[in-house]
Amino acid sequence: MIYVDINSIWNSFLEKMQENLTPVLYDMWFSETKLIELTEERAKILVPMSLHKKHLKENYIDLIEKTFTDVTGSIFKFEFVTEDDINNEAIIDIDEIGVPENTSFNSNLDPKYTFENFVSGASNKFAKATALAVAEQPGSMYNPLFIYGKSGLGKTHLMHAIGNYIKENSRKKVLYVTTDTFVNDFLKIYRKNEGDSNFETIDSFKDKYRNVDVLMIDDIQYLEIAHKTQQEFFNTFNDLYTNNKQIVIASDRSPDDLKKLEERLRTRFVWGLIVDILPPDYQLRMDIIDKKIDSNNMDTFFPQDVKEYIANNCTSDIRKLEGAITRIIAYAAIMNGSDITLELAMDALKDYFGKTVISKNKIEQVLQIVANNYNINVEDLKGKRKSNDITIPRQIAMYICRIYLKESLPKIGSEFGGKDHTTVMHAVNKIKKEVEKNDELNIEITKILNQIPWINE
Ligand code: ADP
Ligand code: MG
């Protein structure tokens, strides 16, 4: 037998593949592959995850065989293995195909979120790979795809990336919605009495949610508190699923932890693939910082110690990390385009890190958060104005202070600009009753509570 250098064969192969594929696809599916064995008719390829085995076999095998034949002049059969397989000699196999469709309609996708600008590292690599696999073959591989992880780790980004990819590469109908939108749309059907201007029939609801190839629902945790809507979501899910339509779901918790969700829904979520995204490690944080600075087209230099400062202080939330960069850039601009230094960065981020923990007064914090949510001022909440856009947030804020902070009625009254304790009691009782029957309000309040860190601990 002649000695062949399999590494250089594989490198020539990879070069050719690179010419044939977009950078995103090449990076994901080929950049980490390696030829580890070549016998007379078999080529054994080492791949990083078992996901690659399935995906390469189902989607790329023709291209791989043809390209490899171009390089070697012979025909080989391919076998894909992971490190684990080499250790336990296991093989898995599955097969299926998708169906194309068309039409232009509002997908609610934000074009700025793509796979290209989703930086990957150990904590999100698997999630990105499955998302891309779903985007390449919607409805056939992992259905539903359930992505979960804490806030600010890139779930929504990945969903939009899936949608944008599918729209770019096929004529499939994609719809991205948040759970609130789904709940609101559904509840509209039941509000026949409230005037007919935005009255929607069941048919138009079904048309919107079932006449699609890909349905993505974000923040499904809010469905836990929307009891009436769970049944309808169940029906929508079943209809899409039986028609091989792709469903993608994101949540801040795993299906197991969505305890208030009907059992039959939770079990369905497990039918497909569940992937989690973990907080970014230091390297990934640095990579993301570099990418963000790069895409900002900054002409000012961002020194290494500033990057390290950000990476060391934003450890668990990429949204926050982005916010830090934006702040520094804005701050430097305000200072007449002065150089970015560690000192300037620390100044710019003075109140930014950990400001949620150190606040004087919890009622004051609730007031601030509620005011932000409704685009009004804290002074409005403390004041006497009685228009609905102020009264309702004020009552909600009182309710939160009473139920979740367990503050006394007189104390709340005095913090809310010196109101009588009976006024507070009335507000608390009103919201308490309302929450029991109004799913939308329930979601609204849950969202506010989610922004109050010490309530969730
Ligand atoms: P989640 O939905 O999990 O709360 P998002 O998808 O909204 O988080 O992400 C928050 C912000 O962080 C977005 O601006 C997003 O673009 C950015 N982001 C998250 N993960 C990454 C990543 N891996 N690479 C680049 N940007 C990211
Ligand atoms: Mg999100």
Image (cartoon, helix red, strand yellow):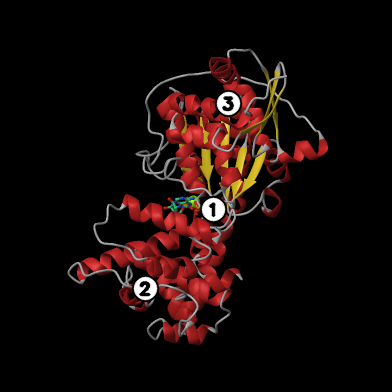
How many marks can you see? 3
Residue 345: which quarter of the image?
bottom left
| Residue ID at (49%, 87%) | 411
From this viewpoint, which residue is outermost toward the right? 88
Instruction: Measure the C-alpha gap from mark 3 to mark 2.
Output: 51 Å
Q: Is residue 142 positioned above or below 438 on the image?
A: above
| Residue type marked 2 | Leu
Q: Residues within 10 Å of mark 2 (few under 14, many from 20)?
A: some
| Residue ID at (77%, 36%) | 86
Q: Quadrant of the N terminus?
A: top right
Q: Residue under circle 3? A: 9
Quick check: marks 1 and 3 in contact, CB under 8 Å? no
From this viewpoint, which residue is outermost toward the top? 74
Question: Percent position (x, y) of residue 190?
Answer: 50, 41
Q: Residue under circle 1? A: 439
Quick check: marks 3 and 2 in contact, CB under 8 Å? no
Question: Percent position (x, y) of residue 240?
Answer: 59, 28
Secondary structure of residue under mark 1 = helix
Q: Is residue 452 positioned above or below 234 on the image?
A: below
Secondary structure of residue under mark 2 = loop
Q: Residue under circle 2? A: 349
Question: Percent position (x, y) of residue 109?
Answer: 40, 39
Instruction: Measure the C-alpha gap from mark 1 to mark 3.
Output: 61 Å
Is any part of residue 282 visible from this angle? yes
* N-term-proximal mark, 3 vs 2: 3
| Residue ID at (41%, 43%) | 113
Residue 402: which quarter of the image?
bottom right
Quick check: marks 2 and 1 in contact, CB under 8 Å? no
